[in-house]
Amino acid sequence: MSSKSQSSSVSGGLLVSATTPVSPSRSCTTLSVHLRWTGSSASCSALIDSGAEGCFMDETWAREHDIPLRQLRESTALFALDGSPLPRIQRETLPLTLTVSGNHSETISFLIFRSPFTPVVLGHPWLVCHNPSINWSSNSILSWNVSCHVKCLMSAIPPVSSVSSSQEEPGDLTGVPEKYHDLRTVFSRSRATSLPPHRSYDCSIDLLPGTTPPRGRLYSLSAPERKALEDYLSVALDAGTIVPSSSPAGAGVFFVKKKDGSLRPCIDYRGLNDITVKNRYPLPLMSSAFEILQGARFFTKLDLRNAYHLVRIREGDEWKTAFNTPLGHFEYRVLPFGLANAPAVFQALVNDVLRDMLNIFVFVYLDDILIFSPSLQIHVQHVRRVLQRLLENCLFVKAEKCTFHASSVTFLGSVISAEGIKMDPAKVQAVIDWPAPKSRVELQRFLGFANFYRRFIRNFGQVAAPLTALTSVKTCFKWSVSAQGAFDLLKNRFTSAPILVTPDVSRQFVVEVDASEVGVGAILSQRSLSDDKVHPCAYFSHRLSPSERNYDVGNRELLAIRLALGEWRQWLEGATVPFVVWTDHRNLEYIRSAKRLNARQARWALFFARFEFMISYRPGSKNTKPDALSRLFSSSVASTDPEGILPEGRVVGLTVWGIERQVKQALTHTPSPRACPRNLLFVPVPTRLAVLQWAHSAKLAGHPGVRGTLASIRQRFWWPTREHDTRRFVAACSVCAQTKSGNSPPAGRLRPLPIPSRPWSHIALDFVTGLPSSAGKTVILTVVDRFSKAAHFIPLAKLPSAKETAQIIIENVFRIHGLPSDVVSD
């Protein structure tokens, strides 16, 4: 806005009230503004004065900052509120660029006058032109006039690094309806990576009393990692999201590979999180959306781009985010990933930005925004209002992850439609897709899983009877129609009420996880208020990829925790009570405090920092529910032939044992039964002894035990009594009986006890048991003095407990001879 348009709006003189309300003794509303002119810039506070009939700048402040001025063609009279004349205005500034709230820019000239208390006054003409919605309690602007989206907000320049028009990429708008293309800036990729303004929602990092952020180790980097670090630091420094630091704190930095093979930096803020005062700002409950969604027929889901980097670190707290690199010491100006309070801070920001729409036609969970309306016409208006508000507050949307004008959407693990809220079928897909058992072992695994929930299923025994009958070794395992019906009915009961309950983040969750060689499984549970029993909320299973199958058992178990927490993030991240993770791998209890982690574990540890939970050990015998889910893929994976190391062209021939030829020759007279596995040879009765001798007594066999002998036989041969025959053969082996070495530990060295110096200072005691009853006594407690060999023989009716033994010795020995110095007993 030019100075002419403002000064010509008043004839005969301008009225200004700034001389009175800016006095320090009175309250006023000021904004932080940024001014730029040719070759220089400055920041200051600006007074919002609806009584001033122009925009003014203090003469002294303008002179101190060398702001270019020019003479007015005609001087302008100036009056105070009481009508008293003030010195006439003779000069004005050249056009300056004024930036308010970090994203609202315009060109404006200021009239020069003397104001000892404020550098800049934004008067009534400026308020009429932009019509800002002001939060008077926080001195911040919530929204602007619609015309500002084209004239001011569209041209807002980030204060740290400018964004050229060639970089102004709005992203892929193919999925965005054309009616929102005029707001394309809200989908901008470049704006989402620029430095956001300071707001009242800046992330504070308050430390516990008496603590200081630890200084992490400096990780050594490979050549590719060093190149990735140089690129990351260059981009972040240009964007202004990080700056060089001299902080005494410093977290370690390492790199992990992304799915596309590129490297991503990770900063280990675990030490800082441990001493940070936690922000308990509540995350919304999905259950609270039931009422507000009544009558809604159209839904739009928005996903915010680069979400956490849209929040600034509170001024003065930036040093606590410092991190060490081989290329220098830096600190963040924006909210980095991995800070404990990040979810709460971001939820508070989005809630306040959309406060007047919240729970009316908007539901917000962190960076996910749901807009709902009863009709399409109203829905379009609602979506426009939300997009405009996000743009005004420097929040940007990821177009490729949004859903517009849908009749149903999947949001936070629930399917939302005009019919209401239902659980996402994917949350119980692990049980729905449970394949029909192909063996007695697989059936026993399913029934073991079902047994945990039998108390919730009426007539469970009757429903499961066709399946239970097949577990008996006395019957042939044959899958029937009745068995399939019972199997399908139980799966349906597992995935419906009253077994399955809706998660409630106000109560404690239990996450049970387990990993097998082929998959991982997990169950999310909660204790129900209605019956005080633990009910499942969701099931999860995941088939391990070939590379994941190569993980050691500890990393597979840790992967199960990582996948389960990621699957149920929308409930666990907002839980008000720390949840419990049950695993049958005891070493994982210490993973959150481990000092040395590999790159994979460190990446997962940063992800775990977003949750409040404790890992608790649970023996495998009690952890059978997730174990069953982790083995859903056993049959399919086991049938897959492993890849050979040598190429086929290098293989000259395969070794064929002579015993195999003997068995195959016997099979010409005796056909293989149907129960024999396809990949094994059936051994007829006449050749079984030869197979046993080959696996146990041959020179290459070396007389192994039962397990070793069975392992050799199981590789190629099968017959119904294989295990029983092997045990009998090994037990009857004369060579093993003559040369078998004991497996007990070696006996200790026999050393005589020292001779005591006086009677009853050193005593020995033992029990004589198994005696015939005499006067009701069958046990004798013997107490012998090792100096004089004198003894007490105390008859007892039975073996006493430790407490009873102590009482007997006190009454019969210590009472007579006093307390000894030494007591020996086995």
Image (spheres, rainbow, N blue to C red):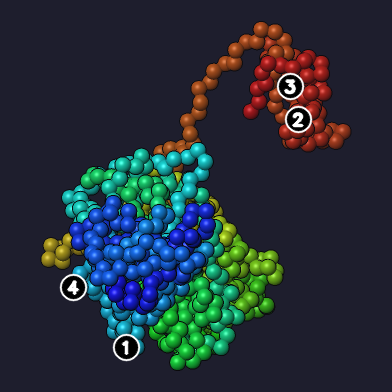
Residue 384 position (above or below residue 159): below
The residue wearing badge 4 is 166
CA–CA distance between discs 2 and 3? 11 Å
Tell me what residue is drawn at x 59 percent, y 61 percent.
Answer: 508
Under mark 3, the amino acid is Val
Q: Nearer the viewer, residue 134 or 811?
A: 134
CA–CA distance between discs 1 and 4? 22 Å
Q: Nearer the viewer, mark 1 or mark 4?
A: 4
Tell me what residue is drawn at x 70 percent, y 8 percent.
Answer: 758
The residue wearing badge 2 is 805
Q: Nearer the viewer, mark 1 or mark 2?
A: 1
Residue 93 position (above or below residue 786): below
Q: Dots 1 and 4: beta carbons under 8 Å? A: no
Mark 2 Cα-neighbour bin, 10 Å: few <14, some 14–19, many ≥20: few
Residue 73 position (above or below residue 176): above
> Residue 177: percent from the left, percent from the top?
34, 87
CA–CA distance between discs 2 and 4? 91 Å
Q: Earlier in the sequence, mark 2 or mark 3?
A: 3
Tell me what residue is drawn at x 67 percent, y 21 percent.
Answer: 823
> Residue 429: percent from the left, percent from the top?
47, 76
Q: Earlier in the sequence, mark 3 or mark 4?
A: 4
The residue wearing badge 3 is 783
Residue 182 position (above or below residue 740): below
Q: Earlier in the sequence, mark 1 or mark 3?
A: 1
